[in-house]
Amino acid sequence: MMRFACLAAALVAAPLYAQAPRPKPAATVNGKEITEVAVQRALKPVAKENRDKARPEVINFLVDNALVDQYLELLKIAVEPSEVEAQFATFKKEIVDAKQDYAKILEKMEITEAELKAEILNQIRWEKFLAQQATDEKLKKLFESSPEIFDGSMVRARHILVTPEPSDEKGKAAALKKIHEIKTAVDSAIATAAAKVPADSDSLTRQKQLNQIANDAFSAAAREHSSCPSKRDGGDLGEFPRMGMMVEPFAKAAFALKPFQVSEPVATPFGYHLIMVTNKKVGEPVKFDMIKGAVSEVYGARLREAIIEKMKSDANTKIEVGK
């Protein structure tokens, strides 16, 4: 959670100067407000025509940040005022050294000095918590159990996405039913075409034919049924690594597949997917000591996800998104 390191993007959750009349919050998380202005600030880099579509994702991001901050507050991880002041002084010095006006920078970011220090405190608290949790034993266990995350392994995949509409329980049930029906149809089409491949073909030729049959059937289904823009390319997503480009459930499922195998339905925040890997590139072995920092980052990302899931499942957690 590199909020202080990338301050301009990370401070989207900070409230603005008090204004009258006070606007309604975009969301509240256990009583803590996420201001509408904070959401609009985060949307500034997004093209105007795409902002309505991006808005829910931005709000989810801000809600997740608030949940992590509140979790760490509950743990009462101590941060000394001197620690905050030291990082604040460093931040201010970097602005001055770059010959920029400190006051104008804050004005442009629409944040007060007190709010900036609050964000620094949250970042220090997270770093302390991560240092406590990310022991060498845990990092090595992650490294050894998931080498494909760190060795440069890549896969190329197609997918079919069914997005629940509406996004309530009824919509989700309908989307799940549809994705199962698509899988049944794809599997049937592959089996029917595969039965026509001559049994006496040499193994390499036969496998190539079977792969092509699976690829063609899946591509056709993606063009017909997928709600992702990749449908125009038969669901092709290109190459991607184990982490960093795809959401975790999708990436985990893709890397577990054999080439040209059709996955079971995979649930992500975007809906339900069928996945077919069309190529795999195995990475080069690396040593833990050489990439310990990268392993710690991955561990931290997963730890953050676990905290968010825990907080959202807590009966006492209350999240309200404004209309």
Image (cartoon, helix red, strand yellow):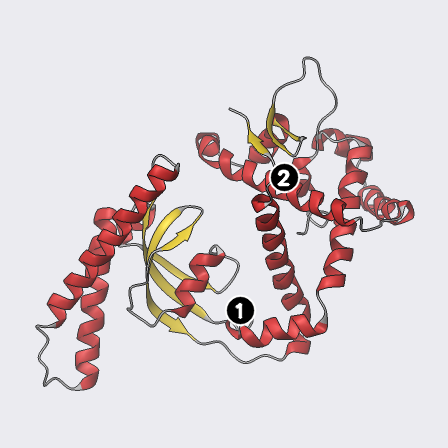
Would you name the residue on which mark 1 appears? 149
Image-quadrant location for residue 300: bottom right
Please name the residue shown 36% across and 50% down the image: 272
64 vs 118, left or right, is left
Seen as rendered, the residue at the extreme front is: 315
Give the x, y percent position of residue 200. 9, 86
Foreground pick, 178 / 170: 170
Give the x, y percent position of residue 304. 63, 53
As measured in the structure, the alpha-carbon distance from the residue carrying label 2 to the one carrying label 1 is 35 Å
How many numbered badges does the structure rendering display?
2
Whether 204 is drawn above or below 74: the answer is below
240 vs 298, left or right, is left
Give the x, y percent position of residue 305. 58, 53
Please name the residue shown 74% across and 31% down the image: 111
Please name the residue shown 75% across and 62% down the image: 131
Which mark, residue 316? Answer: 2
Judged by depth in the image, the label closer to the viewer, 2 or 1, is: 2
Q: Between disc 2 and disc 1, whose residue precedes?
A: 1
Q: Residues within 10 Å of mark 1 (few under 14, many from 20)?
A: many
Residue 223 appears in the picture as rendered: yes
Q: Secondary structure at mark 2?
A: loop
Q: Which amino acid type corresponds to the residue marked 1 in the rendered image?
A: Ile
Q: Which amino acid type corresponds to the residue marked 2 in the rendered image?
A: Asn
Please name the residue shown 24% across and 57% down the image: 183
